Structure formats: C-alpha cells, structure tokens
C-alpha cells in the first residue's frame, strides 16, 4: 500500500464530502446573478460584487468545518477510520488540504462572480471603470 | 505460539468513574475468546484500549505482540474490528467502500472483500445508506476480514440483528478459528457464545470476575439446590478449591452456583441436620454469568490487587437475596 | 444428516454430537464405510467451535465407532452398528433408571410404577416412529 495511493484516496473522500457545499454555493451565486438580471436592485448593485467576493468564501469556510469534521464525528465514521491502519497525520493533512483547496476554488468562483456581477450592475461593458479602480485599491 | 492479547493490571479512570479497575487477561493465539459483561462493565473500554484508541490510566497490554500505546498502527494492520452498529460512509456504494479501504491494506484485499460480499449476498451497487441493518453489518464484517487479520475483534456486532445475520457471523467466527486465527468477541448473546467460544472471561464492575476455558467451566460449575427443613439453617461454609459464585434463598430452598462442587461437598451439606435434599446439575453459561454479575463485588481484605476477585472463597461474601426471588 | 444442538440443556455439546452420531449409526442412517463431514465443514454448518467437533470425533474413534481413512477423513467402522446399538441400549437404560429413581423418590410404590409403565408401553408400542432423535436429559 503505497503512500501516494493512500493520500489520493483520502483526498477523493474529502472532496466527495465537500462537493455538495461547493455546488450549493455555486447555485446560490447563479441564483443571485439571475435576481440581478431580473430585478431592479439599484441600492445593492454597487455592493453586490463585494458581497460575492467575500460572502461566498465566508459561507464556505463556515460550512467546511461542519462537513469535514463535525459530520464525521456525528456519524461516527471518524471512529471507523480510526480503526483502520492509517496514519492520523495523513487523515488530518488531507482534510486540511481539501479544505484549503476548496476554499481556493471558491475564491476563484467568487472572483469570477464579482466580475460578472460588476459588469451586470453597469450597462457599459463587462467590467466597469469603477470596479477596476476598486480592484486597484485592493492590490 | 505467542498469545494474541495479554493484559496486566489495566485500569481506566474517567472523571467520576472507574471503568476498569485492574484487568488481567490472556487471549491465546488461535482461540475464540468471549468477553461477557453487563452494559457498562467495561468491555468496550477494554477493547478501545486494546485497539490503541484510548490509553489506560495504569497497566500494560500487548496485542499481536505490540504495545497499543506505541505501535497502534502496526496493531491495526493485523486486526479486523467490527463494532455495534458500524459507522460507514453512507454515501459510498458497497463496492466503493471496498475500493476505498483496499488502499490502506496490501494486495488481495479487494478480491477477498468481493468474495465475502458475494457470499453474504449484499448488492454491490447500492449505497450504504440504502442497506438494511443486517447488510451493513455484513459489509463491516467483510471489510474487517478482507485483509485476513490474525485477530478479529467483534464488539457486540450482532445486537439487534436477525437470526440469519447472527448465524453468518457465527459461521465466520468458526471459519476463522478453523484456520487458526484468533477471535475476540464481546457479546450479550450468551447462547451463541456457548457454541463458538473456547474461552470465556466475565467482566463485572471493571474487573475480571472469572476466566476459564468453556469446557472446564461447564465441567466444574454447577447449580446446587438445597431443600431445608427450616429456612434459617446456617449451612457449612464450602472452602478449599470450592468457590461459591452466588447464593440465593427462597422459602425452604437455597440455590447456589458453585465452582468445584464435588461429592465430598455434597456429603458435607447432606450431613448437616435439617438438610432434606441436595441436588446439583451443570450450570448453563447464562446462569454462570448471572451468578458472577449479581450484586456488587465486595472488596475483601485479601482481594488480589491485580487479579480476579474471590478466587479463594474466603474473600468473597456470597450475596444472599431473600424473598420469593427464584432464578 | 441433521444434528440438533442445544447449548444450554446441561449436556456438553460434544457429548450431544457423539450421542447423535451413535444413534444415527444404530439406526443405519449412517452406513458402514460412509465418511463423516470434516471438522471444518461440520463446525461451520452447526456454528460451533471446531475443537468441540474434534473432541466428539476423537471420542467416537476411541469408542471404536469411527476410524480414519488414510488422511481423507473419518469413516464408520465395520461392526460399529452393533457397538452403537449396545451404546444406545445402555443410554436408554440409564434414562429409564433415572425416571424410575425419580418415581421411587417421589413416593410411588413399585407396583404402581409397573402399572404406569405397562399402560404407557401398550399405548406407545407401534405408534412411535423411530427417527434419529435427540436425547434430552431428564430435568
């Protein structure tokens, strides 16, 4: 049983567990985008891009703990894993890695959402001057 | 052949509770060893210590020659473990969980797992959350057996399962014994244990109350019923190699579960004036269990610090419960 | 052949196997030269410890009922039928002795007992099918 196989399988498991959360966040993002298109939300159109950029990753970070650790503890799968010949560090490491990778993925998605929503909130072009200035302000 | 499990003086103290108060036991290699005890007697705590999940507050033990506090990983490579209501990843399919678990074990796991699953007739493509309780237990057993472990630990694996599934578990246990592997089973199904176990240890209130081979136990423990003229007669104390495990009275009868009851003891009792009749018959394992776990163990002065209590009957006060309580 | 094992009736399991095999041979359910199931097969079939089966087979060999066949298994000896019939006879005699002892101990007179036995025998003779039966110990 080689170590890379062990790590790959553990990552597969963590990813499978995280997947529902990522999908749910993507659905929320798409839903909000649609709301923007349909409705007239002048008062929040300026803040929505920022909300996306910070909001989605926050939601993800809030959920990842519950999914990767809390759920396992509650379902006692934690204990079953503990009875297998797996190094504790490998289990913890892959969970951490999956969490960080997931968070990175959500940052990327939310950045894209921000760009798109920034574009939608202004009639002129996909990315408006204001958003670019704001970004410059960040970096 | 070296022993599968050894334990000396194992103690486990939780805040406000002493789960184990000095466990000594030896599980010989190749045997089917049954651990009996009431709920809360400490069986699961003991198993957790043996699998390296918990560290004892005192004492040592070895499993397959390794110390669980140092080499838990080595131990887990060599053992299979099935618990009560095993927790598996519900979202995985039966074949997926086999594939997943196979990555942690050497070659051959997946093949053997597949054979077990076919034998148990569990549908491969179904998600575990859609399996019945019995099927889940069988999957857990298949996972535990697939790496051909030298020691199989079963912690009440068949509680709440139907007789078919219980039978499958028993057949698996017997099959392991036939191939010379060791099985440690903690169970409340005393009749099953009576059939498959070579050795039995009864744990009561954190200590090993009795440990013996099944054959020897059945040959030496009897239920003795004494009919008396007068219910208040004091009977002669049975000493020496004779151990009274429990004593009860009901009207003009006394019933004792005794270890080592022989002809001379019978004659001694019959000789006492007022004793009308002394009858003895071999005690069933359930009767032995009830006798060993009735009431609290009185910590006598000559209570062996790391051993079983009441080995010499001087130390044990037999608990006498009067009234119409018939066993 | 079907065995019927009761683990808690006070008779040792290996003893029950010995007795049932003996009775089966006495009734010629097992023929001379017939091979018995191996320890492994029988112990799994009955879900009992293999050492128990081994002990039963050992005793049957000592009794001269079974003999090993060149590493292939155990077979019924020639002359086993007669021996088993003798054993069956003595087991039944012992059962009757226990029943009679109980009757006498309970206060029945010898003549009363004879009458009961006579009546029962008349009722039962010819109406009892001979099957490979389990022998219950009289409680």
Image (cartoon, rainbow, N blue to C red):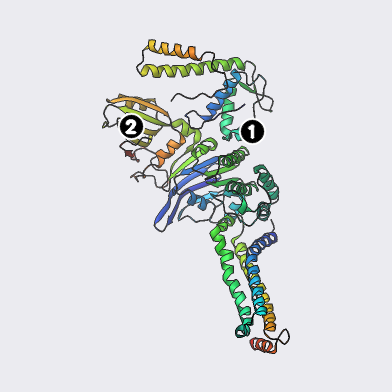
Depicted B273 relative to depicted A71: above or below:
above
The chain identifier of the residue carrying mark 2 reads B
Residue behind mark 1: C41
Q: Position of residue B324 (x, y in %)?
A: 32, 35
Residue drawn at x 55%, y 50% is: B85
Quadrant placement of the C terminus of chain C = top left
| Cα distance between the residues tagged 2 and 1 | 44 Å
Label 1 sits on a secondary structure element that is: helix
Residue occupying image coordinates x 61% and y 50%: B131
Furthest-top residue in this view: C111
| Residue B278 to residue B156: above or below | above
Please state if C25 lies on the left or on the right of A125 as rendered.
left
Name the residue rendered at 40%, 27% in the picture: B280
- Say which quarter of the image contains residue C56: top right
Q: Describe residue C51's horizontal placement relative to residue C97 as left or right.
A: right
* Residue B254 tag number: 2
Within 10 Å of disc 1 (Cα), the crowding (few <14, some 14-19, many 20+) is some
Name the image quarter holding the N terminus of chain C.
Answer: top right
Q: Which mark is residue A14?
A: none
Chain to which the residue tagged by mark 1 belongs = C
Quick one: SS at disc 2? strand
Of the pair B28 and B255, the residue shown nearer to us: B255
């Amino acid at each position: 049983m080689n170590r890379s196989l062990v790590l790959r399988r553990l990552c597969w498991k963590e990813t499978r567990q995280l997947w529902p959360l990522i999908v749910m966040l993507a659905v929320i993002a798409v839903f909000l985008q649609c709301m923007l298109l349909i409705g007239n939300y002048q008062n929040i159109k300026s803040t929505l891009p920022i909300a996306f950029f910070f909001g989605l990753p926050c939601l993800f970070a809030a959920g990842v703990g519950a999914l990767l650790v809390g759920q396992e503890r509650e379902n006692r799968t934690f204990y079953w894993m503990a009875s297998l010949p797996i190094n504790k560090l490998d289990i913890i490491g892959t969970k951490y890695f999956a969490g960080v990778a997931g968070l990175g993925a959500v940052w990327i998605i939310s950045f894209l959402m921000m760009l798109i929503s920034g574009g939608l909130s202004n009639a002129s072009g996909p990315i408006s001057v204001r958003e670019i200035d704001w970004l410059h302000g960040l970096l | 052949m070296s022993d599968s499990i050894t334990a000396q003086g194992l103690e486990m103290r939780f805040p406000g509770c002493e789960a184990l108060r000095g466990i000594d036991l030896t599980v010989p290699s190749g045997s089917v060893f049954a651990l009996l005890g009431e709920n809360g007697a400490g069986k699961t705590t003991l198993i957790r210590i043996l699998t390296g999940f918990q560290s004892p507050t005192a004492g040592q033990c070895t499993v397959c020659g390794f110390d669980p506090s140092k080499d838990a990983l080595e131990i887990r490579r060599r053992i299979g473990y099935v618990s009560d209501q095993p927790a598996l990843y519900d979202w995985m399919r039966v074949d997926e969980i086999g594939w997943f678990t196979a990555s942690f074990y050497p070659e051959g796991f997946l093949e053997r797992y597949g054979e077990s699953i076919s034998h148990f007739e569990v549908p491969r493509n179904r998600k575990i959350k859609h399996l019945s309780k019995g099927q889940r237990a069988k999957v857990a057993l298949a996972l535990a057996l697939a790496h051909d472990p030298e020691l199989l630990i079963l912690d009440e694996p068949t509680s709440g399962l139907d007789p078919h599934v219980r039978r499958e578990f028993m057949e698996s246990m017997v099959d392991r014994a036939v191939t010379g592997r060791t099985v440690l089973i903690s169970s409340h199904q005393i009749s099953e244990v009576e059939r498959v176990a070579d050795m039995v240890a009864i744990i009561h209130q954190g200590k090993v109350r009795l440990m013996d081979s099944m054959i020897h136990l059945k040959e030496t423990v009897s239920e003795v019923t004494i009919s008396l003229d007068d219910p208040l007669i004091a009977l002669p104390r049975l000493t020496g190699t004779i151990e009274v495990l429990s004593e009860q009275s009901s009207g003009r009868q006394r019933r004792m579960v005794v270890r080592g009851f022989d002809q001379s003891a019978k004659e001694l009792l019959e000789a006492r004036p007022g004793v009308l009749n002394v009858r003895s018959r071999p005690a069933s394992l359930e009767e032995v269990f009830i006798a060993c776990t009735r009431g609290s163990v009185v910590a006598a002065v000559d209570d062996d610090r790391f051993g079983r209590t009441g080995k010499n009957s001087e130390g044990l006060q037999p608990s006498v419960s009067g009234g119409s309580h018939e066993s | 052949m079907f065995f019927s094992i009761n683990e808690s009736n006070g008779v040792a399991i290996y003893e029950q196997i010995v007795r049932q095999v003996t009775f089966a041979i006495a009734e010629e359910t097992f023929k001379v030269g017939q091979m018995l199931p191996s320890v492994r097969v029988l112990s799994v079939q009955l879900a009992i410890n293999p050492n128990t089966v081994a002990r039963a087979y050992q005793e049957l060999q000592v009794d001269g009922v079974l003999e090993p066949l060149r590493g292939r298994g155990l077979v019924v000896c020639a002359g086993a039928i007669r021996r088993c019939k003798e054993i069956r006879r003595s087991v039944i005699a012992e059962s009757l002795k226990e029943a009679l002892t109980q009757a006498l101990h309970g206060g029945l007179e010898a003549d009363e007992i004879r009458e009961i036995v006579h009546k029962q025998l008349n009722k039962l003779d010819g109406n009892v099918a001979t099957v490979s039966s389990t022998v219950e110990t009289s409680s």
